[in-house]
Amino acid sequence: MQVLRRYLLAGYDVELLSPRGNGGSRFLREFLAEIREHGQAAVLLPDVGDERPVPSVLLAALADQGRTIPNTTVSSPTELAAHMERAFGSRPLTLVVDGPQALTPLLQAAIALYRASAQLQIVLLCDRENTAPERAPQAVTVPLPTLTLEELGAVLNGVCGAPLDAGTLSRVYAKSAGLVKLAVAIAEVGVIEGNLKLVDGLWVAARDLWSPRLLPMVRSYAQGAGPEDADALEAIAVAGLVSAADAVSLIGADRVERLERQQLIAVEATGTRHWVTVNPPILGEMFRHGRSPMRLARVGAQIEEVTAKPVEALTPIDTRVRIGRIDPMMIRRVSEQRAVTLRTAHRAWEEHGSADAGLRYIDALVASSAPAAEALAVVALVSGLPLSSEQLARLRVWEARVLGYQKGDVRAALALLDDAGDRGRALGEYRGLVVAARMRLAADLDVIPVDAETQLADAVDLPLLVRQELRTELVAVHYARGHLAAASAGIAELRQWSQDRVGHRARVYDALVDLGAGRAEAATRTVSQGFEDAKDELDGTMMRAYTYVLFLLVLSRGQSLGIARVNELFTALGTVPVFPQNAHLGVRVCGLVSVNGSVEEIQGLVRELGSVPLSAGTLPGTSRAWAEAKLAATTGEVSVAAKLCWEDALDLRRRGGALAAAHSAVRSLEYRYDETRAEQLSGWLEGIDSEPFRAILDYLRARSRGHAAGVREVIQLLAAVGQIGHAMQAYRDLSRLQDVRNDHQLAADISAERDAFSSALESSGMDLLQMVATEAKLTRREEEVARLIAAGLTNRQIQEELVLSIRTVENHVHRLMRKLRVSSRQEVVDAVRGWVGEAAGEPA
């Protein structure tokens, strides 16, 4: 409002551009009150469909000033201008006009005459550029921005009486394109029709938010389109999202331009490509829902003829890992399923009192994190029953898990799983179940035995259940030691034994092996499908396991999360499980490492992690040292961070977790490079078949030596093995090396390479977590400005440092803050500190 007032005081007319449904009319009324508070004369000409030569509202305003005039008596602009001058001529007059239709030809002519003797300014609300202000002596165009996501959330909170949960709010915002009237209608109709449910004080989308009741409002957005334009709009709507080239082939270039001018389609750039969608998006839903299946099929066939044509294009590198949001409804269903399982098992145990019923009840008690004493009491009762060798083996396994994982008595748990002598013979052919459980417990809580592979060897005459348990645990040991080829072969055997249908745990290791071997896309597919399957089965344990792997993918690609999203995910984890525990700890550690927050926020997360009663495992990302190192680096203690990670690597090597040790060693070298440690890591990697580690080590070595050619050579390899974050960091490091700075042609070539690489980094468009590798989206100049902000420089100091105009600096700051999705300079500082390979305060 202050901007508009300053323009009016300077003598300008203002064309206020605002899309329909953006709350422009309400803004005008608030602005009118603001003007009148300052003692200025102002008249609001609303959009009421008044077709008379002189708007009746203006006649009423003249009457208020003692100039009562029947509308029929005003026959000329001169007469109307004279009446206006006598009524308002003693002070400036502002006409606040809601739409160009209120500026009738007679009124426009009268305004021109009035201005010859008195001051008059116009504020004209338009949904697109209008010719009326062009006839003014001075005129400017001021856009009225749409509400931000947070602002819209506050509005909907007031309308609905409770806030919308984050996922639902994002859906409403996306469907409405941020237009407040549409968003309010979507939310209110959703509440009335039950598409939005109140869960734990939040409105949560239970079904699709489209409703036929929205038709009158949504249809009005396309009312200006003729029949041919409407058909073209329908084609774009059915296509959903098409490239600009396909849109031109589908409906023609002229129609694309016309629809864009009418704001019925939006054209957005992503990298080197442009995409076309219907605007607002819910208008596209109207076309898709409001047409017959036969018509949709016909339009779909026309689209297929265009989009199925082969086109030459860059193969985009997907830079984002998206974790499906676990909404409150899903959490509740998982909890309810667990409670039902526990009640059913308890009832069966009470009714039958059999060994099988008792074992199922113990399983359910552990899954629901019941007190250890309660589970051990049932163990004691079951142990007094006649037991088969399989039942005895399963009973020992569950008792050991309660002792080791829940009570923390690892020695007693391992002793219970000792299969030597008569204890082993009593288990018969099911002895392998106890062996597999002992190896798993040792890997999670103690030290992997040197002869683990020998102990886990199976025989063809063993029951299939035993062979599968032994082989799955052998895969886990191979992975922990970094023998990825052997682990992959073991998973292939498991598939053969079960007609290509392996259990969730084997699928988790399949994804981990692919990630470790540099097959990031395969890992993403495996874990995404696994997560969906676990969600369908309401298996909270495996949903947590897949989320852990996805967080490892997030870290490998150099992505970062906002503090709000991390807290939301931690809340979704729920209480600490009795068994298994590694995934829970892994999600917390990796989530904390990936967070983009302030020092205080990270300190809070580290304190919370310290209160979680879990022991570090031998899987990557399950060590608290990573979180402590993140905090140390954020506070500027980079040497401390490097030391923490290196000591963690040594401890993991001692425990048999060679692959996890390599992860920690790499993080140590990223914080502070040390040639002695790098040589030691190089020796470790000789026993680990993982290309990503070798590529990262080559990059870190070349960077530390200032070897530009070496850094340049390894970039494509880093990208090929899924290390997108390291590849982007390598480009940044390369541009700062002295050899590159001294060679202008080399610097230009590298800059062009980086721009091409950055432009190829595109998202696949899946709407899940929306974790964005923001550093890949900043231009070089924006990145430079961001780093200067992080160094504490003001805009004026940045202007002097970069020899730019202050306006250019302000534009760079605005764009980079929008791309980073932050609203303050401190958040820019935190974002810069969260970039891959960067540490705050202390130079590497």
Image (cartoon, rainbow, N blue to C red):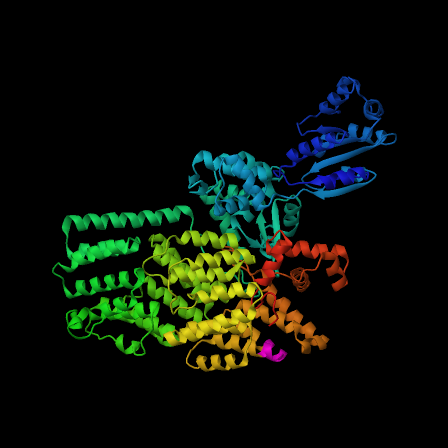
Horizontal side of residue 706 vs 595, given as left or right: right
Is 759 or 768 nearer to us in this picture?
768
Does residue 596 lie above or below 81 as drawn? below
Magenta stretch: dominant SS? Answer: helix
- Could you say which quadrant of the image residue 708 lies in? bottom right
Res 577 quadrant in image: bottom left
519 shown above or below 384: below
Is residue 695 visible to the viewer in this orientation of the structure?
yes
Left or right for 649, reference 130: left
Q: Nearer the viewer, residue 240 or 564?
A: 564
| Quadrant position of residue 496 | bottom left
- Residue 722 appears left or right of 44: left
Magenta-colored stretch includes residue 705: yes
Of all residues shown, which one is farthest toward the left?
386
Where residue 644 sits in the image (x, y, percent)?
48, 70
Residue shown at the point (73%, 42%) measured from the top left: 3
Q: Residue at x 19, y 55 (%)?
A: 358
Residue drawn 22% across the image and 75% down it: 459
Question: Who is closer to the viewer here, 454 or 475?
Answer: 454
**Do we see residue 212 in this rendering?**
no
Q: Position of residue 92 (x, y in %)?
A: 81, 30
Residue 182 lies, in percent from the top left, at 56, 38
The x, y position of residue 131, in whole percent, is 76, 39
Viewport quadrant of the C terminus:
bottom right
Highlighted range, magenta: 702-712
State left or right for residue 209 relative to residue 6. Answer: left
